[in-house]
Structures are given as C-alpha cells and as structure tokens.
Image (cartoon, helix red, strand yellow):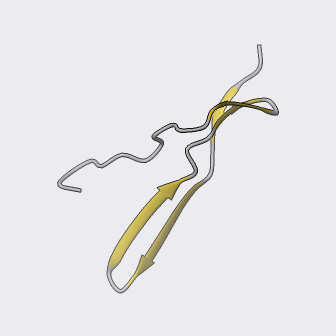
Amino acid sequence: MKEIRGTTILSVRRGGKVVIGGDGQVSMGNTVMKGNARKVRRLYKG
C-alpha cells in the first residue's frame, strides 16, 4: 500500500510575529486524495 503524505508547510517570522500556513493537500503517491485538509491548527489563543 502506498504511503499517505501531507506536505507543504510554510512559516514566516517578521517583526516579532510568526505566521504558519499550509496548502491543504494530502497525497498518496502521485494522486491527490484530499484537497482541503487542515494541516495547521491553533494550539493556544490563536
């Protein structure tokens, strides 16, 4: 069975603040299995 992967996370730090985002795509091999996954979530007081 092929491995399910969630990739492409980007973070930027500027002026003492940080933002993190992701593309929302989950793939299995060369096939996109889900195009709206939430890979980045708030942990504390967003």
Q: Quadrant of residue 30?
A: top right
Is 5 on the left or on the right of 9, as rendered? right
Left or right, 26 with respect to 38, comes to right
Quadrant in which the C terminus is drawn: bottom left
Residue drawn at x 48%, y 58% is 21
In the picture as drawn, the residue positioned furthest to the left comes out as: 45
Residue 7 pos. (x, y %) = 63, 45
Q: Quadrant of residue 16?
A: bottom left
Instruction: Give the mark count.
Output: 0
Quarter in which the N terminus is drawn: top right
Residue closest to the far top: 1
Residue at the right extreme, as displayed: 30
**Seen in the image, is 16 located left or right of residue 8?**
left
**Residue drawn at 71 percent across, 24 percent down:** 3
Q: Nearer the viewer, residue 24 or 9?
A: 24
Q: Is residue 3 above or below residue 27?
A: above
Q: Position of residue 22 (x, y in %)?
A: 53, 52
Q: Which residue in the rendered view is the most extreme toward the bottom? A: 15
Report x, y in % for residue 11.
Answer: 49, 65
The residue at the point 65 percent across, 33 percent down is: 5
Image vertical order of residue 39 relative to residue 16, above or below: above
